[in-house]
């Protein structure tokens, strides 16, 4: 059991890579805070049902599961909901996983497409990190930010997404330096092409284009990212901080 006695807060845990990380961590002994998207004016709609299903699976594995819903792009809501959660539980692992795309060629990109992606992927991860920083520092915790290969190599039509993920990598390295004296390790994972709802939305042509540049000639699975997150969050990585782990089938070296 690599994470026995730990509690992990995972953003965007209701599906995709986040869900896979939640299940892998619970299997290795961690209790899980399942974060799901909730809108301030309608918190009961949205993904609570999926989050509850995941929480039930985690409890069936003999772990504790807590639910925490907020829109990661809404700083006030992030602060308020995390404050409520901290009365109940003290996380010592944070996985900043929630993220979106809103692709468009730069010439056509609308201000709201730029701002929404930067706000959710980059600023939102920072708001959550800030809100959880005190407990993480008290517990010599660790942070894993889910960046992207696109933040390392860029991509046509993804200037906003690439900028947000490159920003996340810069944030990772700065926080790794800032929090090292408290023994908080901060690392990032840069996934390549992983099979989730995010990539299912791609056209066949875009898919083929990507497949052509993956030396291993196959897409990744959410479990591949979960395994990397598990390693970085465990004591096996106790001497690793400020690192960006590429999990991309060789797509970018
Ligand atoms: P996904 O299936 O689309 O899941 C994204 C998660 O983020 C969902 O749970 C989503 O909740 C949540 N989220 C989105 N906007 C939110 C908001 N405003 N507030 C709170 N939560 C929000 O995507 P995924 O493929 O698992 O991606 C997970 C992470 O990996 C992302 O950061 C993504 O950029 C990164 N990544 C993915 C790939 C890939 O190939 N799949 C590659 C590189 C990096 P809702 O369901 O409510 O929208």
Image (cartoon, rainbow, N blue to C red):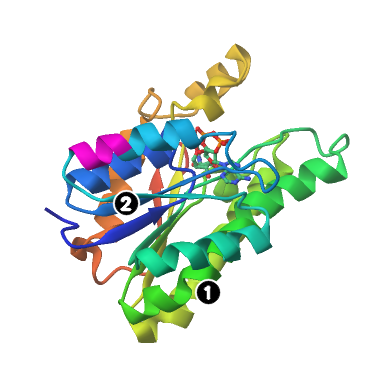
The single residue placed furthest to the top in the displayed view is 204
Secondary structure state at the residue bearing disc 2: strand
Q: Is mark 2 within 8 Å of ligand 1?
A: no
Q: Nearer the viewer, residue 26 or 109?
A: 26
With 188 as the anchor, is 110 left or right in this view?
right
Where is residue 10? Give x, y as percent.
41, 51
Residue bounds of the magenta highlight = 56-60
Residue at image coords 62%, 16%: 203
Residue at image coords 37%, 87%: 181
Q: Nearer the viewer, residue 208 or 95?
A: 95
In terms of sequence position, does the residue under pointer 1 or pointer 2 come before the other?
2
The single residue placed furthest to the left in the displayed view is 1
Where is residue 126? Give x, y as percent.
58, 64
Answer whether residue 78 is visible to the viewer in this image: yes
Q: Which residue is mark 1?
A: 174
Does the magenta segment cover residue 33?
A: no
Disc number placed over residue 98 in the picture, else none: none
With 140 as the anchor, is 62 left or right in this view?
left
Where is residue 22? Give x, y as percent.
33, 44
Q: Which corner quadrant of the image does residue 122 belong to?
A: bottom right
Residue at image coords 69%, 39%: 158
Where is residue 197? Give x, y as percent.
52, 26
Q: Residues within 10 Å of mark 1 (few under 14, many from 20)?
A: few
User: Cα distance, mark 1 to mark 2?
Assistant: 26 Å
Answer whether residue 242 is visible to the viewer in this image: no
Q: Nearer the viewer, residue 117 or 85?
A: 85
With 235 as the anchor, is 48 left or right in this view?
right
With 231 as the anchor, is 70 left or right in this view?
right
Instruction: Determine the main secondary structure of the stretch shown in magenta.
Output: helix
């Amino acid at each position: 059991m690599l994470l026995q006695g730990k509690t992990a807060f995972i953003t965007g845990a209701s599906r995709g890579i986040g869900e896979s990380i939640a299940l892998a961590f619970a299997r290795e002994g961690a209790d899980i805070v399942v974060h799901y998207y909730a809108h301030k004016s309608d918190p009961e709609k949205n993904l609570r049902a999926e989050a509850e299903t995941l929480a039930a699976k985690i409890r069936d594995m003999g772990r504790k599961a807590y639910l925490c819903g907020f829109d990661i792009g809404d700083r006030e809501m992030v602060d308020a909901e995390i404050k409520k959660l901290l009365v109940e539980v003290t996380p010592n692992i944070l996985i900043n996983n929630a993220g979106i795309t809103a692709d468009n060629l730069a010439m056509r990109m609308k201000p709201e497409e730029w701002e929404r992606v930067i706000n959710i992927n980059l600023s939102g991860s920072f708001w959550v990190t800030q809100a959880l920083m005190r407990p993480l520092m008290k517990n010599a915790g660790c942070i894993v930010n889910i960046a992207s290969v696109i933040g390392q190599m860029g991509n046509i039509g993804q200037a906003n997404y690439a900028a947000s993920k490159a920003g996340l990598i810069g944030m990772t390295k700065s926080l790794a330096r800032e929090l090292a004296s408290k023994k908080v390790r901060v690392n990032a994972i840069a996934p390549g092409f992983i099979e989730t709802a995010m990539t299912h939305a791609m056209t066949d042509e875009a898919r083929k284009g990507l497949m052509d540049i993956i030396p291993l000639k196959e897409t990744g699975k959410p479990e591949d990212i979960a395994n990397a997150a598990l390693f970085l969050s465990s004591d096996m990585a106790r001497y690793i901080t400020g690192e960006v782990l590429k999990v991309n089938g060789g797509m970018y070296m």
